DNA sequence: ATAATATTTGGTACGCGTTCTATATTATTT
DNA sequence: AAATAATATAGAACGCGTACCAAATATTAT
């Protein structure tokens, strides 16, 4: 279609640049003062623009927070890799990874909240997870570990996803319903694992 | 110790009464207009007191929202019982209950949020879960179902808790990370079950 | 240059949870 | 009755996410 007069729409590169600029500042604030300090007004001040300008680039705040996911997930993966260095044997490696995964989220409640509990009812910005910096990797790593244990098993995908969401569920319960007399997380992770690789 | 002069502290009965009065109104608002309509100012207007008076009885809003838990959990249990009426056989009953449980939370995202995602970093009001109207029952029901399947099995408790948190995790992932290509919830629940009762 | 369009800005506004302060009310002991 | 201590109230205030809007600014086709 023919271009009409007037200022042209922002190019995708421009959009991308501004978005990552905001994301960068959000990351700085979070690292210095925690998630609680990341507010729209504060962020605008930091970036040097009007608060409402940010809304031209993000639909809502949660869309910005997703920029922080990569940082947290990398941190978690780092924990796991560190532990795995001294562990041999497919079973034991999977077990160690799983326990470290669960421990991480239980020991970092605010990080857990950021990723697994920061979402409003109105869905937005689908596919950020896939696009941004390969967050997928940090989850798919369990797929690899499982396939080392049961190489020729069908439905490895279902097994992986069940393990993942199961572990996340354990962390969630520990975080949000501490009143309930849950079995200890380690035992539950063990139970979960035994069923996945059986 | 000797009582000093001045107005005496509220009796426990008085405290309890006021709290449940507020809880009752919160329930009314939620049922009529949803969770979003339950705000402190609105609640105060409804109850007929000053907004700040509520803070004399509750530390924070989440403590009030816990009064709504019983209602939601009862609703969920009702769903399960309805389904179970026409199902015979221990295995099939457990399977049906689990699938219905997961479905319920996926189909009622706002209810899921209320119970499993409404919690601030500052913990408060521990043991509400146990005290209020036996919320426990709605979870313990899975314990009974499992024991029908594996009556003489040790560690039934760990199995039950793992199943519960696993199912909750499946619902959580569906709710908060829809971008991730999860296997479908039914398959994952099936996988989870098969590992628990194996 | 001019007109047309896109974007940014600033300001105002709403309702929110929450904190604070000052004042009034209530129920008890002296 | 007077003093006292617990509670309730009103009101202002803070920072929050977010919506709305009018004015300014930038960039293009004519």
Image (cartoon, coloured by chain):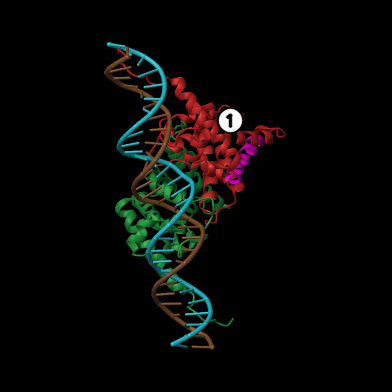
Chain colours: A green, B red, C cyan, D brown
Give percent across and percent down for residue B136.
53, 29
B55 or A86, nearer to the observer:
B55
Q: Which residue is the extreme one toward the right?
A: B86
In the image, taking residue A95 as reference, residue B37 lies left or right, namely: right
Give percent across and percent down for residue B79.
65, 36
A43 or B197, nearer to the observer:
A43
Determine the main secondary structure of the stretch shown in magenta: helix
Report the residue at 63% width, 37% height from top. Answer: B97
Q: Is residue C14 above or below residue B55?
A: below
A99 or A104, nearer to the observer:
A104
In the image, taking residue B42 as reference, residue C10 lies left or right, namely: left
Residue B140 is drawn in which quadrant?
top right
**Chain letter, disc 1 residue:** B
Residue B78 is drawn in which quadrant?
top right
Q: How many numbered badges does the structure rendering display?
A: 1
- Specify the segment rendered in magenta: B91-108
Q: Is residue A137 visible?
A: yes
Give percent across and percent down for residue D9.
43, 32
Q: Is residue B73 above or below residue A136?
A: above
B97 inside magenta stretch:
yes
Q: Residues within 10 Å of mark 1 (few under 14, many from 20)?
A: some
| Quadrant in which the N terminus of chain A appears | bottom right
Check disc 1 and report the residue beneath it.
B141
In the image, taking residue A103 as reference, residue A130 lies left or right, namely: right
Q: Is residue A31 above or below residue A107?
A: below
Q: Is residue A153 visible?
A: no
Give percent across and percent down for residue B124.
40, 34
Secondary element under disc 1, as helix, strand or loop, is helix
Residue A53 is drawn in which quadrant?
bottom left
């Amino acid at each position: 279609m023919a271009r009409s007069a007037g200022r042209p729409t922002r190019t995708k590169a421009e959009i991308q640049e501004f978005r990552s600029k905001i994301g960068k500042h959000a990351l700085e604030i979070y690292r210095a003062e925690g998630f609680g300090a990341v507010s729209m007004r504060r962020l605008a001040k930091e970036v040097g623009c009007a608060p409402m300008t940010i809304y031209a680039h993000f639909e809502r705040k949660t869309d910005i927070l997703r920029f922080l996911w990569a940082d947290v997930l990398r941190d978690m993966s780092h924990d796991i890799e560190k532990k795995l260095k001294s562990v041999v044997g497919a079973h034991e490696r999977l077990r160690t990874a799983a326990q470290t995964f669960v421990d991480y989220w239980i020991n970092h409640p605010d990080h857990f909240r950021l990723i697994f509990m920061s979402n409003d009812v109105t869905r937005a910005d689908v596919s950020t997870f896939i696009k941004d910096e390969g967050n997928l990797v940090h989850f798919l790593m369990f797929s690899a570990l499982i396939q080392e244990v049961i190489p020729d098993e069908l439905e490895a995908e279902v097994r992986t996803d069940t393990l993942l969401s199961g572990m996340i569920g354990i962390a969630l319960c520990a975080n949000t319903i501490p009143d309930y007399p849950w079995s200890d997380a380690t035992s539950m992770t063990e139970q979960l694992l035994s069923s996945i690789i059986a």
